[in-house]
Amino acid sequence: MDDLDRQILDILRRDARTPYTEIASQVGTSEGTVRNRVERLTEDGVIERFTVSTRTGNIKAMIEVSVKVDVDTTEITDR
């Protein structure tokens, strides 16, 4: 891995959806070179995956609750 690979990885770490043409422009090389480098880095296991980061916090599940207001609660109150 050389300096060009490191520059490409730095850009992808900030935004994995950055188009190869934009990366190429930023690092001063061709889109084909960036494409080949990313493919090689992926095949070599340097890049394990591309992921999405969200701002949802620690939400594990969403639950929908319905509440009826016309329910007779007399039986529950008696207990």
Image: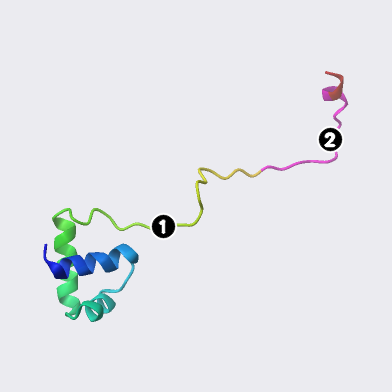
- Count the marks: how many? 2
Q: Residues within 10 Å of mark 2 (few under 14, many from 20)?
A: few
Query: Disc 1 marks which residue?
Result: 53
Q: What is the distance, in whole Å, between disc 2 and disc 1 at their CAs?
A: 43 Å
Determine whether, in the image, residue 60 is placed left or right of residue 78.
left
Where 5 falls versus 67 (above or below)? Answer: below
Q: Which residues are magenta?
A: 65-76
Classify mark 2: helix, strand or loop. loop
Residue at the spot x=27%, y=55% of the render? 49
Q: Does the stretch in magenta take in 68?
A: yes
Q: Is residue 16 visible?
A: no
Answer with left or right where residue 67 lies relative to residue 10: right
**As displayed, is residue 58 above or below residue 1?**
above
Q: In terms of sequence position, does the residue under pointer 2 or pointer 1 come before the other?
A: 1
Task: Examine the rendering and report whether any part of residue 12 can be seen.
Answer: yes
Q: Is residue 77 left or right of residue 42?
A: right
Q: Quadrant of residue 22?
A: bottom left
Instruction: Based on the picture, tell me whether residue 46 belongs to the magenta stretch.
Output: no
Main SS of the magenta part reads: loop
Q: Residue at x 33, y 65 (%)?
A: 14
The residue at the point 68 percent across, 42 percent down is 65
Mark 2 or 1: in front is 1
x then y, percent, for residue 76: 82, 24
Nearest the viewer among 6 and 16 is 6
Q: Which residue is mark 2?
A: 71
Q: Amino acid at mark 1?
A: Ser
SS state under label 1: loop
* Residue at x-position 14% and y-position 74%: 33
